[in-house]
């Protein structure tokens, strides 16, 4: 029986497995680590590449209306001025003067604690899955310590950004539990700066891109002028992005160096953008399901109109049930003609396109589906992580950890085992099959240890299929044993049947 790990320990289990089996390591670990940066090990890089390849194939190669692009990470600084990032790309930050810890003010929550309508103090809590419960416990403790009689009023948490100046002195720091050490929120710029060229003066300041999108807008004219596209069309890009996040956390969910897969989909200003937006949300949801995320784990967060940026017509985030709670995975935004018009104004170059169907020239509007590679990888890992119990070689039931990756994105597609490593006839056939499959897929050869242990090692890294070469293979009919990772069921197949099966499962 499959028993999913409880979500509060799931993140720890995933982080432990990722390190143990070589998926993800903390960057610069030998120097104590570097907060907000992660390295992908041998299995992690395979999984990551498979996610990117699936996205590229489905959104670029399999569509006639989307073209690919790979722009530079460092671009002319004027691009970031035009896009609004230089002046406006920041998060509200608050410092604890005593502990020197730093928080994002929109991830720090506070509430007055009142007993029968009388405020007796304040509680604060850093955003977490059970923040309401944590705050209520702290309020009950405050009431007990102050020996107050009566009923605690409902705790209504608010973002620290909504605190009134007179409340800053009263709200306790989550680090010390004492009021008076939190600063008022101030804007913290998220773009990493660097210097380009031999002179390190202000004029040499450049930025590491905080999104790949602006590289698309900056190349829009080149792609239109190459003459391959007509409205509606999209430009897609996969690439690194950098943000000096105030509080990188939750493993690879929010890091300072990450990768994005973004599309700018250009449409006519008179197009029915609401319908197109809906279509994009559905397409994106279906894609997440196609790589193995459970549909029931995905939900939509429609941004309220009064919280939208002034140029945005609508934004819906696809949310996923991560181990640390329901959080944004994929943003699908209708950004009007804002970005292109900004670049038109700042560069002096026309961003219009001639629409043959209506014989009109205009600056197109844009729908932007923007997805993080690392967040997708974390979603995939959390959905795949499973613990169950299966009998070992001696028939004794044992706990098993497995990653139920879809064969499409699994880092290793199949493992090939000779039943015994000291039987040259078995080893020879297994090695030949391994070489043959290796030309098409990432497969693994393993001859060491009991067969059950070899299966278990592959289950833990999510290899969907085990192929065993045994005595029937060499003495009887040449068939091999094909084992399914999730059900542990085994069946005999010929080599042709095996290859056809793998093609269907992996290449879809
Ligand atoms: N061009 C629009 C844009 O960049 P965003 O909502 O800031 O929008 C899009 O980012 C996606 O990039 C997010 O939905 C998330 O998947 C990913 N992302 C953003 N910041 C991230 C971070 N610090 N670490 C990992 N992924 C991040």
Image (cartoon, rainbow, N blue to C red):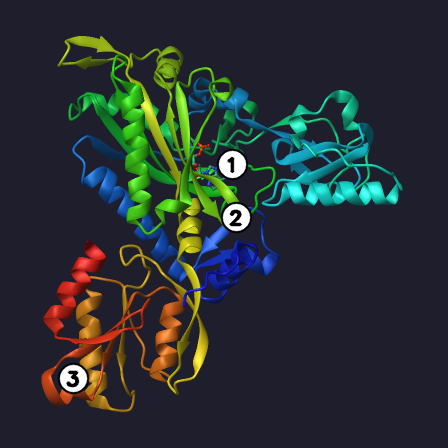
Give left or right: position of 9 versus 409. right
Give left or right: position of 217 versus 11. left
Question: Badge 2 local density, few (<14 within 10 Å), some, or many (20+)?
Answer: some
Q: Secondary structure at mark 3?
A: helix
Asked whether residue 47 appears in the rendered view, the answer is yes
Residue 225 position in % (x across, y down): 20, 21
Give left or right: position of 492 versus 79. left
Q: Dividing the image into four quarters, tell me where ligand 1 lies.
A: top left
Q: Who's the residue at 46% across and 26% down the image?
A: 303
| Mark nearer the viewer, 3 or 1 | 3
First reached walking from the N terminus: tag 3 or tag 1: 1
| Mark nearer the viewer, 3 or 2 | 3
What is the CA distance from the residue labelled 3 to the residue labelled 1?
A: 55 Å
- The residue that label 2 is drawn on is 37
Q: Does any atom of ligand 1 lie closer than 8 Å to the CB of label 1? A: yes
Residue 360 position in % (x across, y down): 18, 8
- Residue 458 or 393: which is nearer the viewer? 393
Give left or right: position of 340 versus 477. right
First reached walking from the N terminus: tag 3 or tag 2: 2
Residue 293 position in % (x across, y down): 36, 49
Q: Secondary structure at mark 1?
A: loop
- The residue that label 3 is drawn on is 473
Q: Are marks 3 and 1 in contact (CB under 8 Å)?
A: no
Asked whether residue 99 appears in the rendered view, the answer is no
Q: Who's the residue at 15% across and 10% down the image?
A: 358
What is the CA distance from the residue labelled 3 to the residue labelled 2?
A: 48 Å
Q: Quadrant of residue 226?
A: top left
Residue 243: image tag: 1
- Residue 86 or 459: which is nearer the viewer? 459
Q: Who's the residue at 42% across and 19% down the image?
A: 312
């Amino acid at each position: 029986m499959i028993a999913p790990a409880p979500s509060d320990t799931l993140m720890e289990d995933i982080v432990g497995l990722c390190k143990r089996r070589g998926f993800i390591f903390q960057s610069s670990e030998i120097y104590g680590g570097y907060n907000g940066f992660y390295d992908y090990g041998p299995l992690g890089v395979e999984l990551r590449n498979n996610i990117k390849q699936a996205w590229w194939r489905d959104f670029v190669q399999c569509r006639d209306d989307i073209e690919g692009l790979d722009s530079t990470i460092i671009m002319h600084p004027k691009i970031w001025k035009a896009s609004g990032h230089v002046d406006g790309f920041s998060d509200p930050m608050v410092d604890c003067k005593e502990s020197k810890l730093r928080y994002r003010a929109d991830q720090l929550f506070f509430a007055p604690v009142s007993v029968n309508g009388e405020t007796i103090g304040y509680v604060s809590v850093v955003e977490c899955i059970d923040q309401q419960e944590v705050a209520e416990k702290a309020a009950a403790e405050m009431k007990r310590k102050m020996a107050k009689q009566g009923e605690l009023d409902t705790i209504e948490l608010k973002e620290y950004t909504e605190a009134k100046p007179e409340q800053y002195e009263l709200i306790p720091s989550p680090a010390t539990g004492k009021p008076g050490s939190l600063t008022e929120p101030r804007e913290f710029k998220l773009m990493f700066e660097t210097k380009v060229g031999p002179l390190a003066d202000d004029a040499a300041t450049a930025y590491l891109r905080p999104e790949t999108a602006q590289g698309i807008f900056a190349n829009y004219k080149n792609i239109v002028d190459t003459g391959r596209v007509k409205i509606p069309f999209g430009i897609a890009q996969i690439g690194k992005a950098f943000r000096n996040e105030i509080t990188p956390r939750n493993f690879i969910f929010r890091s300072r160096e990450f990768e994005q897969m973004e599309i700018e989909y250009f449409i006519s200003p008179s197009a029915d953008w609401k319908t197109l937006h809906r279509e994009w949300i559905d397409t994106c949801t279906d894609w997440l399901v196609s790589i193995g995320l459970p549909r029931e784990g995905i939900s939509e967060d429609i941004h309220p109109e009064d919280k939208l940026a002034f140029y945005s017509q609508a934004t819906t985030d696809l949310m996923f049930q991560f181990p640390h709670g329901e959080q944004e995975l994929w943003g699908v935004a209708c950004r009007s003609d804002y970005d292109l018009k900004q670049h038109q104004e700042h560069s002096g170059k026309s961003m219009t396109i001639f629409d043959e169907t209506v014989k009109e020239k205009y600056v197109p509007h844009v729908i932007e589906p923007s997805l993080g590679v690392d967040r997708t990888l974390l979603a995939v890992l959390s959905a795949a992580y499973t613990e169950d119990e299966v009998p070992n070689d001696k028939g004794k039931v044992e706990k098993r950890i497995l990653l139920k990756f879809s064969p499409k994105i699994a880092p290793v597609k199949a493992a090939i085992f000779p039943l015994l490593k000291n039987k040259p006839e078995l080893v020879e056939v297994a090695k030949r099959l391994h070489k043959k499959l290796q030309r098409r897929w990432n497969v693994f050869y393993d001859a060491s240890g009991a067969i059950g242990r070899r299966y278990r090692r592959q289950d833990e890294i999510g290899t969907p299929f085990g192929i065993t070469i045994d005595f029937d293979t060499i003495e009887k009919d040449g068939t091999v044993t094909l084992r399914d990772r999730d059900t542990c069921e085994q069946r005999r197949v010929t080599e042709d049947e095996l290859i056809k099966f793998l093609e269907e499962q992996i290449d879809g």
